[in-house]
Image (spheres, rainbow, N blue to C red):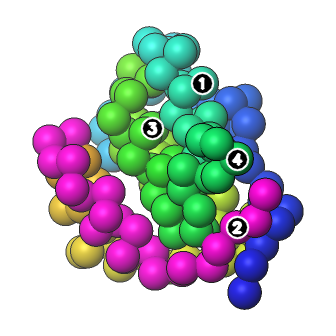
Amino acid sequence: MKFSIIVHPSVDEVINIHRDVIENYSDPGYIITELSFNIVNRSGLESAVAMPKMTSYGQLLYPTIAEMSSSYCWFLTKNHPFQDGNKRTAVNSMLAFLECNGFPLTLDTQRWIPLIECVKSREQIRDEIVREIGFDTDIEL
């Protein structure tokens, strides 16, 4: 099956996902302040949101749903655009992208937590995230 119309989150939507993550999914006892919502790397945020849509010579750099969605997770984690909650925002942005495009994914947290924790230190982990997502649906331009 091939897809040609893909819904991507905007920078503002990812900021809203981040706000929701901080407000609703922070550890008990975590004191939420305005600093919790700070964007510390705006260009990193914009780059992370743009990367999954990137093309080269008319070809998508991330041509499957799994590769595209994992790119949201990967680049939001690597670029570390927020003061706090980057990994949680990255995973939730990836899940929102998948759901908006008709590919809801239920995560096994025992499997995903170690994967996301490794993103900052290991390049090859992105391939593991793609395999874990498992959707290999192609996208057409």
Q: Report the front residue among 55 and 33.
A: 55
Q: Residue at x 78, y 58 (%)?
A: 141
Q: Are marks 2 and 4 in contact (CB under 8 Å)?
A: no
Mark 3 neighbour class, 10 Å CA radius: few under 14, some 14 to 19, many 20 or more: many
Q: Are marks 1 and 4 in contact (CB under 8 Å)?
A: no
Residue 116: where, in percent of width, then height?
28, 54
Mark 4 neighbour class, 10 Å CA radius: few under 14, some 14 to 19, many 20 or more: few
Mark carried by residue 139: 2
88 sits left or right of 1 in the view = left
How many angstroms separate mark 4 from mark 3 (CA)? Answer: 24 Å
Q: Quadrant of residue 83?
A: top left
How many angstroms separate mark 2 from mark 1 (CA)? Answer: 22 Å
Q: Which residue is mark 4?
A: 58
Q: Is 56 contained in the magenta span? A: no
How many angstroms separate mark 2 from mark 4 (CA)? Answer: 12 Å
- 115 w.r.t. 46: above or below: below
Mark carried by residue 76: 3
Q: Which residue is mark 1?
A: 46
Residue 62: where, in percent of width, then height?
54, 56
Q: Residue at x 58, y 68 (%)?
A: 64
